[in-house]
Image (spheres, rainbow, N blue to C red):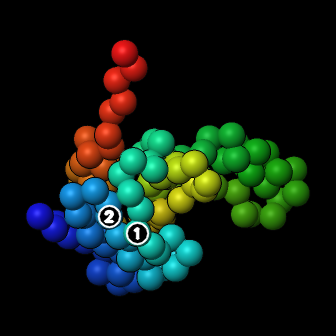
Amino acid sequence: MIETVELRNKPELKFILNTDEFDIVDSSEPKNNGTYSYAEIKSAELNAKRTNWLISILSIIVDFLTGSGNGGKFKTKANLILKTENRNLKIWLNDADYGKAENLTELIKSKKPTHNNV
């Protein structure tokens, strides 16, 4: 059974899930495109958008000292990190459906084969 999960329309970001592997179509980061086996995924980590308080505080301090007016809150963008044996894919989730991304992450984790050591 093939299932397609579209996280974003423009630029296109979708995952096409097959039984043993999945395809990534990422128009904003073409280097992420490809076919990946669930077995080669070591981990799938979803990171929500959040404020980077350290950078924000340092920015405000520098702004205060220099009077440049550039200080403010710095946000870390939501992303999905898929780690394989050979590389780490960082998929940016700008304007993507975060709820679908959560479900997709769990689905990838559930399809990853488990190895029982006897």
Q: Quadrant of the N terminus?
A: bottom left
How far apart are the alpha carbons under marks 2 and 1?
A: 6 Å
Residue 61 quadrant: top right
Across and down, in percent, residue 24 comes to 38, 70
Residue in the image at 61% along x and 54% along y: 86
For the point 51% across and 70% down, which residue is it?
A: 32
Q: Residue furthest right?
A: 66
Q: Are marks 2 and 1 in contact (CB under 8 Å)?
A: yes
In the figure, is residue 45 to the left or right of 70?
A: left
Determine whether the residue tagged by mark 1 lies in a helix, strand or loop: strand
The image position of residue 59, as x and y in percent, is: 74, 51
Number of numbered tags placed on the structure image: 2
- Callout 2 secondary element: strand
Callout 2 environment at 10 Å: few (<14), some (14 to 19), or many (20+)? some
Using the rendered image of the protein, determine whether residue 42 is visible from the camera's viewpoint: yes
Along the line of sight, the residue nearer the viewer: 19 or 5 = 19
Mark 1 Cα shell of 10 Å, populated few (<14), some (14-19), many (≥20):
some
Q: Is 87 in front, or is 51? A: 87
**Residue type at the position of mark 1:** Thr
- Residue 109 appears in the figure: no
Please name whichever residue, 111 or 8, is drawn nearer the observer in this view of the structure: 111
Q: Amino acid at mark 2?
A: Phe
Label placed on residue 22: 2
Q: Which residue is labeled 1 in the image?
A: 35
Residue depicted at x 57% and y 48% = 85
